[in-house]
Amino acid sequence: MDLMITRKLLAALFILALLLSACQKQAPAGSQAGASAGELGQQVQVEGGTYTDVSVQELQAMLENKDFVFVNVHIPFEGDIPQTDVSIAYDEIDKHLDELPADKDARIVLYCRSDRMSNIAAETLVGLGFTNIYNLDGGFAAWEQAGLPVER
């Protein structure tokens, strides 16, 4: 009878271990699993380099000590997140480089309505040699959904 209890206990512990390992958060494909706690966002690999997707909460923190050019790339215009510096159509960003920092290492944060257009703009800028590009994951819609202010 002791053998039966031991087997049941071992089986229960094995199942518990499986459940705990399945519940652990795993790094998404393409992310940097060893990133430090101070590192911002999630790296997105594209041809020519990477850009970083940031969450609404991460962008809020960035805006507290704003040290970047904040660009709305959505067309047609539907509104801005406060502190937006410039609006440039996502599909024309390569024609408006004069509105962006000349230093290709300068921090630039992009957003659009849902993040589809800003992903395209981020990929374009990375392809042009920009090295410090950020994209608001979920875009303007995620910002609004979080109950944060917008400018119409």
Image: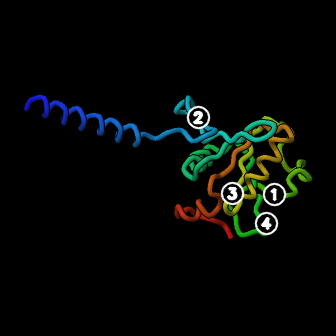
Q: Nearer the viewer, residue 10 or 123?
A: 10
**Which residue is under mark 3?**
115
Q: Earlier in the sequence, mark 4 or mark 1?
A: 4
Circle 1 sits in a helix, a strand or a loop, which is it? helix
Q: Left or right: where does residue 119 sit relative to residue 128?
A: left
> Whole-percent x and y of residue 136?
65, 52
Q: Which dot marks residue 75?
A: 4
Q: Nearer the viewer, residue 60 or 52?
A: 52
Q: Which dot marks residue 90?
A: 1
Say which quarter of the image contains residue 51.
Answer: top right
> Whole-percent x and y of residue 84?
71, 56
Q: Left or right: where does residue 98 sit relative to residue 131?
A: right
User: Which residue is drawn at the image coordinates 83% and 60% (left, top)?
Assistant: 89
Label 4–label 2 contact, CB within 8 A: no
Q: Earlier in the sequence, mark 4 or mark 2?
A: 2
Q: CA distance from mark 3 to mark 4?
A: 12 Å
Circle 3 sits in a helix, a strand or a loop, which is it? loop
Q: CA distance from mark 4 to mark 2?
A: 31 Å
Q: CA distance from mark 4 to mark 1?
A: 7 Å
Q: Amino acid at mark 3?
A: Asp
User: Which residue is drawn at the image coordinates 79% and 59% (left, top)?
Assistant: 87
Label 4–label 1 contact, CB within 8 A: yes
Q: Earlier in the sequence, mark 1 or mark 3?
A: 1
User: Which of labels 3 and 2 is toward the front?
Assistant: 3
User: Which residue is drawn at the image coordinates 58% and 34% (left, top)?
Assistant: 39
Circle 2 sits in a helix, a strand or a loop, which is it? loop
Q: Amino acid at mark 1?
A: Tyr
**Which residue is under mark 2?**
39
Label 3–label 2 contact, CB within 8 A: no
Q: Left or right: where does residue 49 sit relative to residue 81?
A: right
Q: Residues within 10 Å of mark 2 (few under 14, many from 20)?
A: few
